[in-house]
Every structure is written in C-alpha cells, then in structure tokens.
Image: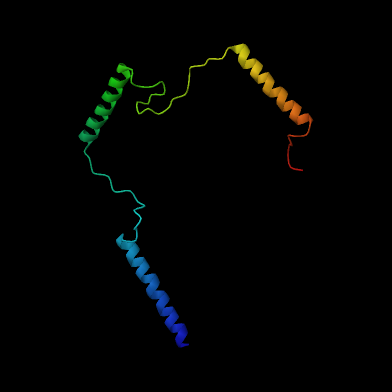
Amino acid sequence: MRNLALTALALVLGLGTGVAVAQTGQADQAGSRAAPAEKTTKAERSQARKQRLSETGRENKAGELSPGGEASGAPAASTSKKYSKSERQSARKERLDESARQNKSGQITSGER
C-alpha cells in the first residue's frame, strides 16, 4: 500500500512539473517554434512591397531574371529544345508500342489478383 502511494505521488509530481515547464515556454529547448515576427505598420509593409517590386522590375529590365522568373539562380524549365509535332507523335507511338508489348507478354499486371 505504501509503495502504491509513493508511486502515485512520484507520478503526480512528475506530470505536474512537466505541465508547469511546458506552460512557461522553457520546454522548447530545440527551438522548434519560429520567433515571433516584429510588428509592422501598414505603411512599413507597403514600403517593403514597393521595394521588392521595384527590385524585381529592375532585374527584369536588366535581363537578370531567368525565364522562370527567379533572379536567385534557381534553375528554370529548359526551353532550349523544341520538338516538332512529328517528333512528339513518333515518341508517343514508341511509348504506346512498348507498353502494348509489355502488356501482351504479361509484364504489366492489371488489378489485384
């Protein structure tokens, strides 16, 4: 009986301190939450937006933006190779023929069996 009471007391103390620490914010040792953002006025947000848009416009006029619209150097979709209609049709036909061949030989299973 005494062991049961001591165990219950230890459990209550352990859970109670855990809840208290969590409520103080000290339990977040890893910094998993982002720091609160600074409060800004509407005028400051408007000014920052104008600055961002003017920088993008300047980069666009100077030719610094890639076709994807990224000035950071991020790779954009490659538009260097254009395929003709006949090339696309022949590639599609080859893919369909390959799929049909695999399907007939039983390599492609359909549904659950």
Location of residue 36 in the rendering, given as x and y in whole percent from the top left corner: 28, 48
Location of residue 2 in the rendering, given as x and y in whole percent from the top left corner: 45, 87
Q: Is residue 39 left or right of residue 2?
A: left
**Image point 35% across, 51% down: which residue?**
33
**Image point 56% across, 14% down: which residue?**
83
**Image point 27% across, 45% down: which residue?**
37
Q: Is residue 99 left or right of residue 43?
A: right
The number of callouts visible is 0
Rendered position, 3 above or below 26: below
Quadrant of the rendering where the C terminus is positioned: top right
Query: Quick one: 48 or 55, which is closer to the camera?
Result: 55
Q: Quadrant of residue 100?
A: top right
Question: Which residue in the rendered view is the most extreme toward the bottom?
Answer: 1
Q: Is residue 99 left or right of residue 36?
A: right
Question: Which residue in the rendered view is the most extreme toward the right?
Answer: 105
Rendered position, 44 above or below 34: above
Give the colouring mode of the picture: rainbow
Q: Quadrant of residue 45?
A: top left
**Image point 66% across, 16% down: which residue?**
90
Location of residue 7 in the rendering, given as x and y in whole percent from the top left corner: 44, 80
Q: Is residue 71 left or right of residue 85?
A: left
Query: Quick one: 73 or 8, which is closer to the camera?
Result: 73
Location of residue 78 in the rendering, given as x and y in whole percent from the top left corner: 48, 21
